[in-house]
Image: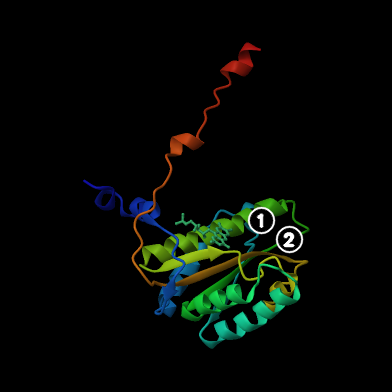
Amino acid sequence: MTEATANPALHALNTRRSMKFLRAPAPKPDELAQILQAAMSAPDHGALRPWRFVRIQGEAIGRFADAALDAVKRSGDPRMTPEKEKSVRAWMAEVPLFLALAAKIDHNSKVREQEQVLAAGAAVMNILNATHMLGYGAFWSTGLGTYVEEVQEILGLDPLEYRFLGYLAIGTPACAVPPANRPDFRDFLTEWTGAEAAVK
Ligand SMILES: Cc1cc2nc3c(=O)[nH]c(=O)nc-3n(C[C@H](O)[C@H](O)[C@H](O)COP(=O)(O)O)c2cc1C
């Protein structure tokens, strides 16, 4: 029995790949609702629900590209060359749906900011997996002015309150992508038994 038949959910987790080049159709409204609902199951210290998503779709994508690129250029970022701008615009023009991602920080909570950001990141991961499980592609990027305050403000995410976590592009993969070559988990795992500490 293959992993796909023995455990389809695990198989889906293990076969997710980021897809940068996307086109229409985007997930249908009921599918997007399922995808976003999956984000609500992220672990969340203190039940603060810090995750926030701003949907940008249709003609709004072009308007956002104009506003964000202008802000990035005003910020003086030397990487935003005319060639880079052209390629970003061409990429965005094909993507049918963006979600801007943020963590709304509760500064009065005992839960540290890092944990609130991690909860929001976990919610984004659920979105990536749910998108894949429904047969669509997605790509998380921190391009396009994620660290330019003016871009954050354009999205209504006051930098005093929100940590901006970038964007998810979501749609139908524009081309087939081969399976990813994933590392062996053993390279990332160590074991602590306490035995050495007990000897000292
Ligand atoms: C927070 C975050 C920000 C990222 N920003 C970018 C980015 O700006 N540009 C980029 O090429 N990849 C970025 N990536 C990586 C891609 O989303 C993706 O994970 C990577 O291409 C590997 O693909 P995989 O998810 O299939 O392993 C980012 C990933 C994370 C988690």
Please determine whether, in this image, residue 198 is positioned above or below residue 164. Answer: above
- Which residue in the protein does label 1 denote? 116
What mark, if any, has residue 106 been given in the picture?
A: 2
Label 2 vs label 1: CA separation? 8 Å
Picture coordinates of residue 150, whole percent (x, y): 74, 74
Q: Please give left or right for residue 29 compared with residue 60 in the image.
A: left
At 56% across and 82% down in the image, what residue appears? 61
At 60% across and 56% down in the image, what residue appears? 119
Picture coordinates of residue 191, whole percent (x, y): 52, 28
Identify which amino acid the numbered label 1 is placed on. Answer: Gln
Q: Which of marks 2 and 1 is nearer the N terminus?
A: 2
Asked if the residue under mark 1 is in contact with the one under mark 2, i.e. CB atoms within 8 Å, the reply is: yes
Pick whichever, 14 or 193, lies toward us.
14
Identify which amino acid the numbered label 2 is placed on. Answer: Asp
Quadrant of image for the C terminus: top right
What mark, if any, has residue 182 been given in the picture?
A: none
Picture coordinates of residue 83, whole percent (x, y): 58, 75
* Residue 40 seen anywhere in this rendered image of the structure: no
Q: What element carries label 2?
A: loop
Picture coordinates of residue 49, whole percent (x, y): 62, 62
At 69% across and 80% down in the image, what residue appears? 70
The residue at the far bottom in this view is 59
Question: How many marks overall?
Answer: 2
Mark 1 surroundings: few (<14), some (14-19) or many (≥20) residues within 10 A: many
Mark 2 surroundings: few (<14), some (14-19) or many (≥20) residues within 10 A: some
At 34% across and 58% down in the image, what residue appears? 178
- Residue 56 falls in image quadrant: bottom right
* Residue 131 seen anywhere in this rendered image of the structure: yes
Q: Is ligand 1 within 8 Å of the beta carbon of the residue shown at mark 2?
A: no
Q: Is mark 1 on a helix, strand or loop?
A: helix
